[in-house]
Amino acid sequence: MTESGEDLASLLSAGDLFPNPERGDLLQGIIIARDTNGLIVDLGMKRDGVIPRADLDKLPEKEAVVGVGDEVSVMVIDPVDQDGNLIVSVAQARESGDWLEARRKMEDEEVIEATPSSVNRGGLIVPFGRLAAFVPASHISNLPRGLGEDERIAALRELIGKPLPFRIIEVDPQRRRLVFSERKAIRQFRMQQKAEIIQTLKEGEVRTGIVTSLREFGAFVDIGGADGLIHISELSWTRIEDPSKVLRVGQEVEALVIRLDPKSNRIGLSLKRLETNPWEANVDKIKSGQELDGEVTVITSSGAFIRVSENLEGLMKFGDGPGNLMPGMSVRVSVTEFDPENERMDLALIEE
């Protein structure tokens, strides 16, 4: 093979060492020419890159001055366009630092403060360096639900110009997706605040709080920046089927701190334990075989709960179903077993 033939083979072999560029790759190059379409960049590969003129127009005025001989960083935006060109972007490469910073903050679960600049049909637009982040309406904590489109957009516009906390939840440079969540930032802030408050609490102390929400399993109470749970079993010494029968949202209550779990960031509260324990109060008053007057409070599939004194109920199990028993009915019962230590009393109906 001739020397020139060896040089050509060597060049082709060296060219094969460069991997095929993919969308999103960051490359270094030197501008070697300018034409009507933009700038031509030598990337040290088989093909030169093309920086479209429109890409240069995206740069701030101070950064738009680039010319032949300048070294630039570019991002691949189209490995092969319809004309076979390798299309690269200076603007997107310079945004890459913001993408990296966004990814770092997302991985660190960092809460950032930013100011919405505009809205669209789906949510807020928030500047982040050279990038524009999107905040879906579903990730805005105080946005009322069930609004029509015009009402939703009007509510979103109220947030323009107001600094808000955000968590970054999606970073995808290739799809140009940067997504923020205000709701997750608020939740994280509250969790951090709750963890700090837990360190100041002690089991057995009484705290005043406001009922913030009611659930089937109990009530959440804000005790000064942290929500504690009053489980349904801790609302009253008597059986409660529906917490809304005992409490309402916004009500001020005093609750006893009965459980602190720093690991799971949970606070357990009780209302009933601030009242006299009826099991202890009746230890010497009720015995097995004793007959008592009572009132049916709740009927379940297995039996009826009978209140025999203030805040003290026993269970009368059914043999053949509830018969004609109904809540509110007065009955005469006998105590078949009284176990105050385990808060249990079994009853039997005395037929008249």
Image (spheres, grey):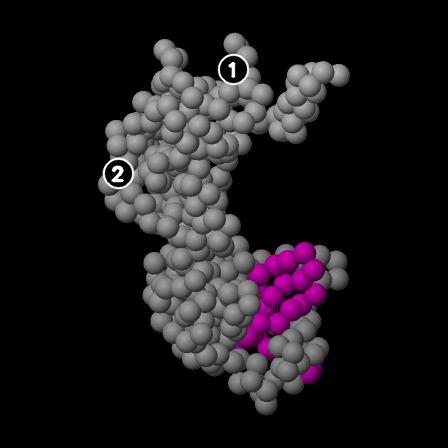
Above-or-below relation of 73 to 9:
below
**For residue 55, above or below residue 246:** above
Magenta-highlighted residues? 288-317
Give whichever of 230, 26 is nearer the camera.
26
**In which quadrant of the rendered view does residue 145 lie?**
top left
Q: Nearer the viewer, mark 1 or mark 2?
A: 1
Q: How far apart are marks 1 and 2 (CA)?
A: 41 Å
308 up-or-down from 54: above or below: below
Q: Can residue 339 be seen in this view?
A: yes
Q: How many marks?
A: 2
In percent of the image, x 43 and y 53: which residue is there?
110
Q: Which residue is drawn at 59% across and 87% down?
A: 283
The N terminus, quarter of image: top right
Can residue 245 be seen in this snapshot?
no
Looking at the image, which residue is at 66% across and 81% down?
A: 339
Q: Name the residue under label 2.
A: 160
Which residue is painted at 52% across and 70% down in the image?
262
Mark 1 closeness class: few <14, some 14–19, many ≥20 residues within 10 Å: some
Q: Residue 157 at x, y = what percent? A: 27, 35
> Circle 1 — which element?
loop
Outermost residue, front side: 3
Type of amino acid under label 2: Ile
Amino acid tagged 1: Asn
Badge 1 vs badge 2, beta-carbon distance below 8 Å: no
Q: Does the magenta stretch include residue 296?
A: yes
Q: What residue did someone put label 1 on?
A: 85
